[in-house]
């Protein structure tokens, strides 16, 4: 095998490993990302609070109606009980009963409004709870899929590391040092394949002399523009 081919093969392995390492970082970030779930939880909590408040208002309205009816009952008992015979007192009591009944109508309207508000809050709470359950299921499914992918590509990484170690045994220390330096300075790509008489990494066209030299199996040639090692293929 030629020197450029050995380095090109190493480059292919390292590029795959680079992708795996980057993807693992992405997966780890995605596993921690739960903004949609947290938003659904917050919405459900607000709906629960709104429902509790609506129920409290409804109970208060029911109590007020009940107390008002008790007042009317007591006043009517006094009015029709026969104990009060003074005409003025009777007239005042009649007016009081009429006033209590008018206010009872107001309280009953408030009670109806409170009941309707409680029904609406209960429906919203039911919907938000359902949405939360769906979001939880999606989040769980997505997490499981990401964990399975993470496990799968980690196995690929282990296999590629074995291939890399095997490839290194046939590469000289000088060639490896050159390759490593270019990987650092050329965004991880040290070796570029020649395609259509051009460097596949930067796209620059190669002159005839460089193309001819690239055919040598024992010579390392570089792109005159980007400096990467050329592999003719």
Image: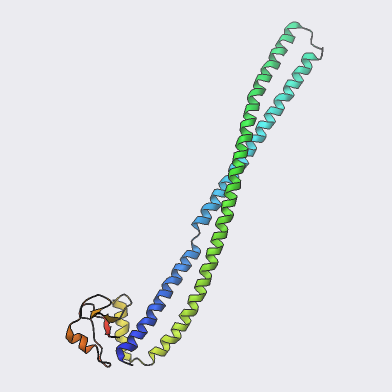
Asked if residue 111 lies left or right of residue 209, the reply is right
**Where in the figure is residue 133, as x and y percent of width and height?**
59, 55
Q: Foreground: 167 or 79?
A: 167
Asked if residue 87 lies left or right of residue 28, the reply is right
Q: Foreground: 16 or 89?
A: 16
Residue 117 visible in the displayed image: yes
User: Which quadrant holds the C terminus?
Assistant: bottom left
**Where in the figure is residue 206, as x and y percent of width and height?**
20, 81
- Furthest residue toward front: 196
Question: Which quarter of the figure has residue 75?
Answer: top right
Residue 174 visible in the displayed image: no
Question: Which quarter of the figure has residue 194?
Answer: bottom left
User: Which quadrant holds the N terminus?
Assistant: bottom left
- Furthest residue toward right: 82
- Furthest residue toward top: 87
The residue depicted at 50 percent of the width and 72 percent of the height is: 149
Asked if residue 141 lies left or right of residue 164, the reply is right
Q: Measured along the vertical axis of the image, is residue 140 above or below residue 91?
A: below
């Amino acid at each position: 095998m030629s020197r450029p081919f050995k380095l090109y093969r190493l480059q292919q392995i390292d590029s795959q490993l680079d992708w795996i390492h980057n993807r693992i970082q992405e997966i780890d970030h995605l596993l921690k990302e739960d903004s949609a779930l947290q938003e659904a939880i917050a919405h459900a909590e607000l709906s629960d609070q709104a429902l509790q408040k609506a129920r409290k208002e409804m109970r208060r309205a029911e109590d007020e109606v009940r107390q008002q009816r008790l007042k009317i009952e007591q006043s009517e008992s006094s009015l029709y009980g026969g104990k009060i015979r003074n005409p003025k007192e009777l007239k005042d009591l009649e007016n009081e009963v009429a006033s209590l009944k008018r206010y009872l109508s107001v309280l009953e309207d408030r009670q109806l409004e409170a009941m309707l508000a409680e029904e609406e809050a209960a429906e919203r709470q039911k919907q938000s709870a359902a949405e939360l359950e769906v979001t939880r299921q999606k989040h769980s499914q997505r997490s499981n899929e990401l964990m399975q992918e993470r496990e799968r590509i980690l196995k690929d990484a282990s296999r590629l590391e074995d291939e890399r170690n095997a490839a290194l045994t046939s590469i000289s220390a000088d060639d490896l040092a050159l390759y490593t330096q270019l990987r650092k300075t050329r965004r991880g790509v040290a070796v570029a394949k020649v395609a259509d008489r051009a460097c596949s990494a930067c796209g620059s066209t190669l002159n005839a002399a460089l193309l001819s030299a690239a055919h040598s199996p024992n010579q390392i040639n570089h792109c005159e523009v980007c400096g990467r090692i050329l592999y003719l293929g």
